[in-house]
Image (cartoon, rainbow, N blue to C red):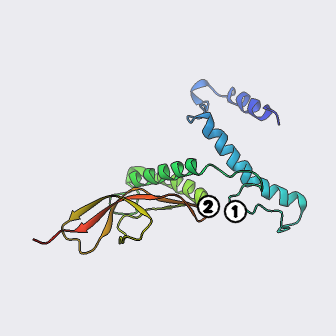
Amino acid sequence: MSAFPEVLAGLRQLRFPAPLRIAEAPWPPTWERALADALAARAAPEAAAATAGVAGSGHEAASGSGAPAGEPGPDPAWLSDLGTGLWRLKQRMLEPGTDRPLDEMRRAYRHLESVMDVAREAGLEIQDHTGAPFHSGMALQVLAFQPTPGVQREKVEETIKPTIYLNGTMIQMGEVIVATPEASP
């Protein structure tokens, strides 16, 4: 393809005064390429099925990553960083101890939820473990065991990094702080 659509987009910006023009993307070009590759990989199987006119012909990607067969899927490290960033942003927007957004964050929170829905549809699952009972067999990296008054059994006191799955496969192990009962004298 050519850069013709990009040229048209640039020319459309000239219709508006400078203060109203849309600024360049604030992220690095590598992120933009990764997003474009992920979107292209997701659209490619749908386009191939539409042009062939046959759904379920057995030519879909067997990898389950959304990428066409023979092509690598999105970078799991990049997706885990993205998932962690979305999760941290969500935590900052919520009222402490609830799942309700702060009053000043209500409008922006709706947009965050829609981005998280898109990530979920693409196979990214983000698990927060805060408040969950803890046992030693869990696939979590414990950063600290913290004796806490009033705790009868071990539970996750704080999630530092969430556990992230891509199409059911763990790509990031959660990091937590575990509250333990205080030792009796």
Toward which corner of the image does residue 98 lie, by quadrant?
Answer: bottom left
- Taking depth in this image into account, of 11 and 112 the one nearest to the observer is 112
Q: Secondary structure at mark 2?
A: loop
> Considering the image in quadrants, where does the C terminus appear?
bottom left
Work out whether 80 lies above or below 13. Answer: below
Residue pictured at 21% horizontal, 65% vertical: 148
Q: Secondary structure at mark 1?
A: loop
Q: Residue 120 in the image: x percent, y percent?
A: 58, 61
Work out whether 28 lies above or below 74. Answer: above
Q: Residue 64 in the image: x percent, y percent?
A: 69, 62
Task: Judge left or right: residue 25 versus residue 133.
Answer: right
Asked if disc 2 and disc 1 are in contact, CB closer than 8 Å, the reply is: yes
> Considering the image in quadrants, where does the N terminus appear?
top right
Q: Which mark is residue 123?
A: 2
Q: Residue 70 in the image: x percent, y percent?
A: 77, 53
Amino acid at pointer 2: Gly
Residue on which the image places disc 1: 64
